[in-house]
């Protein structure tokens, strides 16, 4: 989640919503018999009035499967007011789900929301309708989906499934746009955390795999473009998630390649990015995870030679950080994403495994990353 007003591109977040229904499609990684959602006003400066909400099993596009629409309530009420910087959790509703099934969540806002708390790159299509259509099964009213081609999610912090057999511990993928999935297929759910979830299901060990990636995010510093620094948001976005057992950490590339980012920390001068500072940042995440008895998997920083932000100095820092991740022995285990994308050690993502910009993987690249992960890392 991030505040609106990011300089990368315009979204619906800047203006917010008024007398509009917002329909968002997500995929759950474990099944169950009940569903509830979390709605966030984390970056709001005024209370957020949610007039109505619903959840149902996705048919196609913005349509919901007949017989599956459920009204969501909050402490028994169909509406709720969320204070600035707060969140609301819906009451659970009976709705059977299967692993990797898509759910459609609709939020209706009668009153103006103001600028929205949102997730900038969802790689899914989000739909908007004028007026109250949060209980519509069909997609007729949802004529508006013209926003950035890779989509955004608004106010929706999480979807929880429960019931049935006891849920295993969750895996959280923590990182920047490479974890977020920029370059994956729109509405294809083929980011590396998606493929990891599919591998776990195929192995007969399904478990929640939560994607806590944020595009342009840095490990050490906040920025208007990339949101709260990784070391600042780690507790909220990882350790405070339900039943988290393991986190995969892939962080630091943007600190290196966007070291002169003009949107960082309100223009304040920051110390130069060095391998030592990045390693100390990783150590802070390891300490925080171990204090909560959460397993920590270190991921090597992926190559980006020939991309716009590459420099010889940055490459040297990446090499030093990766050497520490591989040999330092401080992570519980390591996944070598750099090798998965660059088996020959050229410093450049192999052709066919990047989306064309030499820094973000293609769907094939994300699959290669997920297949490099040893599933034994998630035994806890």
Image (tube, rainbow, N blue to C red):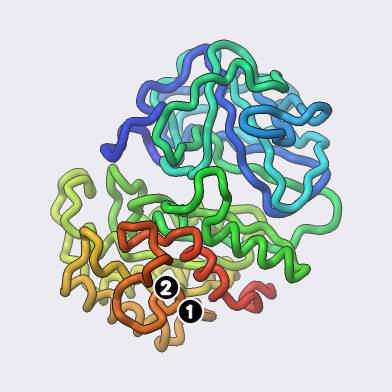
Q: Nearer the viewer, residue 337 or 223?
A: 337
Residue drawn at 23 percent across, 74 percent down: 315
Residue drawn at 50 percent across, 36 percent down: 153
Residue drawn at 16 percent across, 63 percent down: 271
Residue farthest left in this picture: 269
Observer-side mark, 1 or 2, equals 2
248 relative to 46 in the view: left or right: right
31 relative to 178 in the view: left or right: right
Is residue 86 visible in the rendered structure shown here?
A: no
Check disc 2 and report its element: helix, strand or loop.
helix
Check disc 1 and report its element: helix, strand or loop.
loop
Residue 342 percent location from the top left of the image: 38, 77
Above or below residue 301? Residue 155 is: above
Above or below residue 184? Residue 202 is: below
Which quadrant is home to the N terminus?
A: top left
Name the residue beneath numbered marker 2. Answer: 341
Name the residue beneath numbered marker 1. Answer: 331
139 relative to 230 in the view: left or right: right
Which quadrant is home to the C terminus?
A: bottom right
Residue 14 percent location from the top left of the image: 35, 26
Residue 199 percent location from the top left of the image: 66, 67
């Amino acid at each position: 989640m991030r505040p609106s007003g990011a300089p990368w591109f315009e979204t619906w977040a800047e203006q917010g919503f008024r007398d509009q229904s917002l329909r968002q499609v997500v995929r759950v990684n474990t099944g169950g018999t009940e569903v509830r959602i979390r709605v966030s006003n984390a970056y709001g400066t005024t209370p957020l009035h949610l007039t109505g909400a619903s959840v149902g099993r996705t048919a196609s596009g913005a349509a919901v499967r007949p017989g599956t629409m459920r009204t969501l309530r909050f402490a028994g009420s169909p509406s709720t007011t969320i204070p600035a910087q707060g969140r609301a959790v819906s009451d659970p509703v009976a709705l059977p789900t299967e692993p990797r099934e898509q759910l459609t969540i609709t939020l209706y806002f009668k009153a103006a929301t103001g600028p929205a708390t949102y997730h900038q790159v969802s790689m899914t299509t989000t739909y908007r309708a004028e007026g109250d259509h949060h209980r519509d099964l069909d997609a007729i009213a949802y004529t508006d989906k013209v926003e950035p081609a890779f989509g955004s999610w608004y106010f929706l912090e999480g979807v929880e499934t429960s019931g049935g057999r006891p849920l295993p511990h969750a895996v959280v993928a923590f990182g920047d746009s490479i974890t977020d999935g920029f370059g994956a297929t729109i509405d294809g759910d083929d980011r590396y955390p998606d493929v990891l979830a599919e591998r776990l299901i195929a192995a007969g060990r399904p478990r929640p795999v939560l994607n806590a990636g944020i595009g342009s995010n840095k490990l050490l510093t906040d920025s208007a473009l990339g949101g709260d620094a990784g070391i600042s948001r780690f507790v909220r976005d990882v350790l405070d998630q339900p039943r988290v057992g393991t986190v995969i950490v892939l962080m630091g590339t943007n600190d290196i390649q966007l070291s002169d980012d003009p949107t960082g920390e309100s223009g304040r001068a920051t110390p130069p990015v060095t391998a030592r500072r990045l390693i100390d940042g990783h150590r802070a995440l390891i300490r925080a995870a171990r204090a909560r008895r959460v397993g920590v998997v270190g991921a090597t920083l992926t190559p980006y030679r020939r991309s716009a932000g590459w420099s010889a100095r940055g490459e040297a820092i990446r090499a030093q950080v990766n050497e520490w991740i591989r040999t330092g022995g401080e992570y519980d285990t390591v996944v070598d994403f750099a090798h998965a994308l660059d088996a020959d050690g050229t410093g450049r993502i192999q052709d066919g495994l990047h989306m064309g910009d030499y820094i973000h993987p293609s769907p094939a690249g994300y699959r290669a990353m997920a297949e490099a992960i040893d599933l034994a890392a998630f035994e806890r």
